[in-house]
Amino acid sequence: MTEREQSAGGGPRPVALITGASSGLGAEFARALGPRGYDLLLVARRRKRLEIMAAEAAVKHGVTAEILVADLSDAADLQRVVERARAISDIRILVNAAGFGLHGAFSEVDVEREMDMVRLHVEACVQLTHAVLPAMLKAQRGSVINVASLGAYVPLPGFATYGATKAYMVSFSRSLAIELEGTGVRIQALCPGFTRTEFQNQQGADLSLVPKFMWMAPDQVVASSLQALDKGQVVCVPGVLNRIAARLAGPLGGVVQRRVAAQSGWRTPPGKAAAEPTPAEESKPR
Ligand SMILES: NC(=O)c1ccc[n+]([C@@H]2O[C@H](COP(=O)([O-])OP(=O)(O)OC[C@H]3O[C@@H](n4cnc5c(N)ncnc54)[C@H](OP(=O)(O)O)[C@@H]3O)[C@@H](O)[C@H]2O)c1
């Protein structure tokens, strides 16, 4: 284990393990948690970016930052990160932020990329959470933040696997939150809406029609997440408009699905832009 600097209180500083720390929300968590007194364990694939993040944390906040270059959709790389996480006894925060989006009709997308997404959003999140919990439970403190998405609320056509993996992260976090009640360990599913990061460069959908007021900056999202964590909120949807959207997703989800399908050129029979089917309708044989 690397030697870490002593905190003002004399002991070693607790560690924040952040995946996806080379850009966007993960990088912003690193910028926010360093000044809060954490050393950093930064994980992503782009070494140079991680080195810059580590140097920035050291210079600006006197933080010791270790980097682990790993592709978390690769089993051997994930295992390496899991082993490193198990070896550090004082990981106080785990942020599962590594992720990416893919847009396209499911029948036409590269299924291996979809499987990479499942491995990254689901498997890495489960494995890393499982790796850090024993030490957190022993210490009776610690937090896990799973960066899901507002997309978990409305299963959008064109993002079938993405939305499903994010819904998994929310469900997983909500279950664990109950299991962990009274242990001192907190868990949060963070569900951001449109956030200006590198995410949009890769996911392939045209978001130029999304109005400016719907966008948030990554530092706003992270501030909202950490505030919610302090209050013990299990699901954090940053931004008033996103919270309204999350509320409306149940009753209006079906309409939104059809609208997005129509805009994307998927088949939408005229007059079918109706409300979500009731459970009884859904269970009817087709
Ligand atoms: N931006 C949004 O509008 C938005 C909205 C809702 C939810 N989210 C979620 O927020 C999370 C962070 O995304 P972001 O917006 O910050 O996008 P971003 O700027 O593209 O950051 C994604 C991060 O994930 C890392 N990553 C991607 N694939 C990886 C892999 N196979 N192994 C390890 N690291 C990997 C990337 O690093 P490397 O390329 O260096 O590996 C990068 O650090 C994602 O889970 C995304 O689903 C984003």
Image (tube, grey):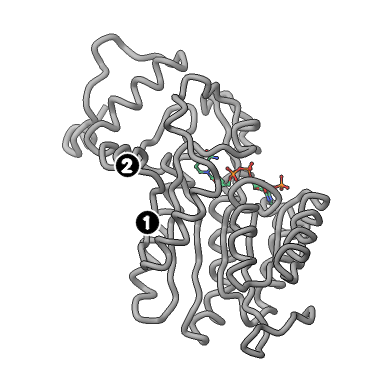
Residue drawn at the location 43% of the way across and 27% of the way down: 157
Label ID, residue 246 = 2
Task: Label 1, secondary structure: give it.
Answer: strand
Label ID, residue 235 = 1
In this view, the residue farthest toward the bottom is 10
Image: 7 above or below 188: below
The x and y percentages for residue 184 are 42, 80
Quadrant in which residue 89 is drawn? bottom right
Q: Nearer the viewer, residue 230 or 19?
A: 230
Image: 104 above or below 174: above
User: Earlier along the polypeptide chain: callout 2 or callout 1?
Assistant: 1
In this view, the residue farthest toward the top is 270
Task: Label 2, secondary structure: give it.
Answer: helix
The x and y percentages for residue 106 are 52, 28
In this image, 125 relative to 150: left or right?
A: right
The x and y percentages for residue 33 are 60, 65
Quadrant in which residue 263 is drawn? top left
Q: Nearer the viewer, residue 13 or 258?
A: 13
Residue drawn at the location 64% of the way across and 58% of the way down: 31
